[in-house]
Amino acid sequence: NVVKKKAKYTPFTVKVVNKNGKVVKYKKVTFQIKNAKYYAVTSKKGYATVYLKHLKVGKHIIKSSYGGCVISNQITIKK
């Protein structure tokens, strides 16, 4: 779970690893929050970051998916 202050863009970062724990480099990750989809490519260290636009104050669920694996996280936006 992540807590952020309200902003025009809210960054959200995930680290992608394979089943052996090795980082996944330069692969597309899909993020979904409500009906909006975002995409990012992992870095050489396995991190993918998206900048979510205009999230309102409150709790939001974001789903991150890669290779059939889906993880849900909660983002709380405060004033």
Image: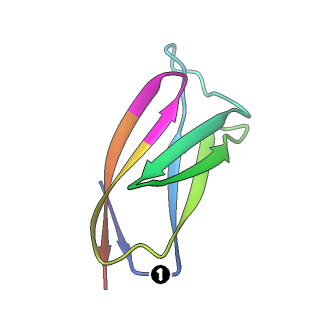
Q: Residue furthest bottom?
A: 79
Question: Which residue occupies 33% across, 48% down?
Answer: 73
Question: Would you say 33 lies left or right of 47 here?
Answer: left
For residue 52: magenta? no
Quarter of the rendering containing residue 9: bottom right
Q: Is residue 55 above or below residue 2?
A: below
Residue 46 seen in this snapshot:
no
Q: Is residue 20 above or below residue 22?
A: above
Q: Which residues are magenta?
A: 64-70
Q: Residue furthest top?
A: 20
Amino acid beneath label 1: Ala
Q: Residue furthest left?
A: 58
Task: Please provide percent x and percent y for residue 63.
Answer: 40, 44
Question: Which residue occupies 38% across, 78% down?
Answer: 5
Q: Is residue 52 above or below residue 17?
A: below
* Residue 68 or residue 15, whichever sits in front: 68
Query: Secondary structure under badge 1?
Result: loop
Question: Would you say 23 lies left or right of 3 here?
Answer: right
Q: Which residue is mark 1?
A: 7
For residue 66: magenta? yes
Q: How is the image coloured?
A: rainbow
Task: Please provide percent x and percent y for residue 1.
Answer: 29, 53
Task: Please provide percent x and percent y for residue 34.
Answer: 38, 55
The mark tally for this picture is: 1
